[in-house]
Amino acid sequence: SVSWQYMAEPERTRLARNQTKILSQFAYRCAAHEYRLLASGHAHFVVYNKLMPWDHLAGVLIHAEAGGHAARFDGSAYLPSHLGGGLLVAPDKESWHELRRELWAQ
């Protein structure tokens, strides 16, 4: 899932275009439900731009406990105090880097 509606241009258009490289797409517009899908292995990754702690703090923790990797778009660690800078959540660090490269490709 790529939640690009809160992103500024040109990043918004780039992610919308590049998400077509991914075979499966979903957008429930409910971070709690999407994190549940990730932690249970029913989804591969999510991308968020707007980072409110009530949307992401518990989900990132649960996903990490399930073995997943989450980091901001620049690769730095997510902290509950971050309200921007985006978040890419993937099954592991290697997948995170591959998704980051492909989704942000020029």
Image (cartoon, rainbow, N blue to C red):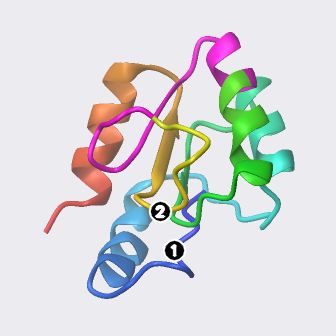
Q: Specify the farthest residue to the left.
A: 106
User: Mark 1: few, some, or many residues within 10 Å (few <14, many ≥20)?
Assistant: some
Q: Distance between the residues labelled 2 and 1?
A: 13 Å
Q: Residue 85 carries which label?
A: none
Q: Is residue 38 a member of the stretch shown in magenta?
A: no
Q: Where is residue 32 in the image (x, y as percent from the top left)?
A: 84, 47
Q: Specify the farthest residue to the front.
A: 81
- Which quadrant is home to the N terminus? bottom right
Nearest the eye: 56 or 90: 56
Q: Is residue 72 a member of the stretch shown in magenta?
A: yes
Left or right, 67 with respect to 93, comes to: right
Left or right, 9 with respect to 30, comes to: left
Disc 2 residue type? Gly
Quarter of the image holding residue 61?
top right
> Mark 2 — residue?
84
At x 68%, y 38%, the residue is 43
- Which quadrant is home to the C terminus? bottom left
Q: What stretch is highlighted in magenta?
A: 62-77
> Mark 1 — residue?
4
Q: Where is residue 33 in the image (x, y as percent from the top left)?
A: 86, 48
Q: Position of residue 63 (x, y in %)?
A: 68, 24
Left or right, 38 with respect to 22, comes to: right
